[in-house]
Image: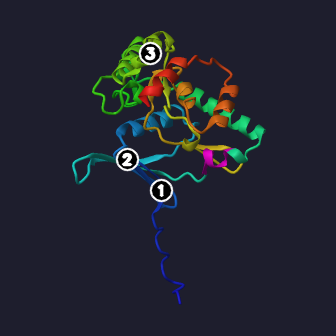
């Protein structure tokens, strides 16, 4: 028989998400940790920029962090953040009616517009494309996390890097491979970008109202077409992508060249 005066047991840790290089665990009713080799300072830097300059964008609150090496000497990190209750958009999307789907997608675009207003810190003013902390992007189109290159200083440099990686991965073996440079989109705007807008990274309530944008590890300054190109990449979210394309009220970019590059770089 239990003792009614005894202190309640602490909450047992609960794994919320597990992927290569990253585990998200709920350790208290209102606290989660994200830890692993993919947890880098860039994600924290991005979230703190959002909290400071776009506070109406819903994201978890960062309490603390740690970066170092594990017992094997490999880089690792940990973020301690607020727990946001809700469901991933990909788990409820099919249950939403057309009106709710349209509302969700328009709200996503509204949040993207707010994110794009975040100013670039003065120390990064010479960079056209970089991570939120000023380090080089590790997007696969630009070389991946192992690429030793520095941040890119112009849109031309972005296109040159994509083509360089494309050639390294044998893209010229395709009959139209040499045409890639002329097919890549051009941009004269470098804007703050989430980098991985996808249903799996969006928490919603039962009615599809957005509660939080998650996973800011890829965020930084990119050409203004970057979020659009990333959310339109090949995946199983075809219905969501169709709704996102139809609800975008501003410019839509020709991303034929990005799609072409991805067939060998991703």
Instruction: Compute the Cα span from label 2 to label 3.
Output: 33 Å
- Left or right: where 140 falls relative to 240: left
In this rendering, the answer to whether 12 lies above or below 165 is: below
Disc 2 secondary structure class: loop
Above or below for 187 versus 113: above
Q: Of callouts 2 and 3, which one flags the residue occurring earlier in the amino acid sequence?
A: 2
Q: Mark on residue 177?
A: 3
Q: Are marks 3 and 1 in contact (CB under 8 Å)?
A: no
Q: Are marks 1 and 2 in contact (CB under 8 Å)?
A: no
Depth order, front residue of 26/93: 93
Give the mark toward the camera: 3 or 1: 3
In this rendering, does residue 186 appear at all? no
Q: Which residue corresponds to mark 2?
A: 21
**Is tag 3's residue or tag 1's residue first in the polypeptide sequence?**
1
Q: Residues within 10 Å of mark 3 (few under 14, many from 20)?
A: some
Name the one closer to the observer, 103 or 161.
161
Q: Which residues are magenta?
A: 87-93
Give the residue pinned by disc 1.
31
In the rendering, at what x and y percent does residue 147 appear?
A: 30, 28
91 falls in the magenta region: yes
Distance of label 3 from label 1 (alpha carbons): 48 Å
Q: Residue furthest bottom?
A: 1
- The verdict on residue 235 being magenta is no
Residue 172 x/y as whole percent? 40, 17
Dominant SS type (magenta)? helix
**x 45%, y 64%: residue:** 13
């Amino acid at each position: 028989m239990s003792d009614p005066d005894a202190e309640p047991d602490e909450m047992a840790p609960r794994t919320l998400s597990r992927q290569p290089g990253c585990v998200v665990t709920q350790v208290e009713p209102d606290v989660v940790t994200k830890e692993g080799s993919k947890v880098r300072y860039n994600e924290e830097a991005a979230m703190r920029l959002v909290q400071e300059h776009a506070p109406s964008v819903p994201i978890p609150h960062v309490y603390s962090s740690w970066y170092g090496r594990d017992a094997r000497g490999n880089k690792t990190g940990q973020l301690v953040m607020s727990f946001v209750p809700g469901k991933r958009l990909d788990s409820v999307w099919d249950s939403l009616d057309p009106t709710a789907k349209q509302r969700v997608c328009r709200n996503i675009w509204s949040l993207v517009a707010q994110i794009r207003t975040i100013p670039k810190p003065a120390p990064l003013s010479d960079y056209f494309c970089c991570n939120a902390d000023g380090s080089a992007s590790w997007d696969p189109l630009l070389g991946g996390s192992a690429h030793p290159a520095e941040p890119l200083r112009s849109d031309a440099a972005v296109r040159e890097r994509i083509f360089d990686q494309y050639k390294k991965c044998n893209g010229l073996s395709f009959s139209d491979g040499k045409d890639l440079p002329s097919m890549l989109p051009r941009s004269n705007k470098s804007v703050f970008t989430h980098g991985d807008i996808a249903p799996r990274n969006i928490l919603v309530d039962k009615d599809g109202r957005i509660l939080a944008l998650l996973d800011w590890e890829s965020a930084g300054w990119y050409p203004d077409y970057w979020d659009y190109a990333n959310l339109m990449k090949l995946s199983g979210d075809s219905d969501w992508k169709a709704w996102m394309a139809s609800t975008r009220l501003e410019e839509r970019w020709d991303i034929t060249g990005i799609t072409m590059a991805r067939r060998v770089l991703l």
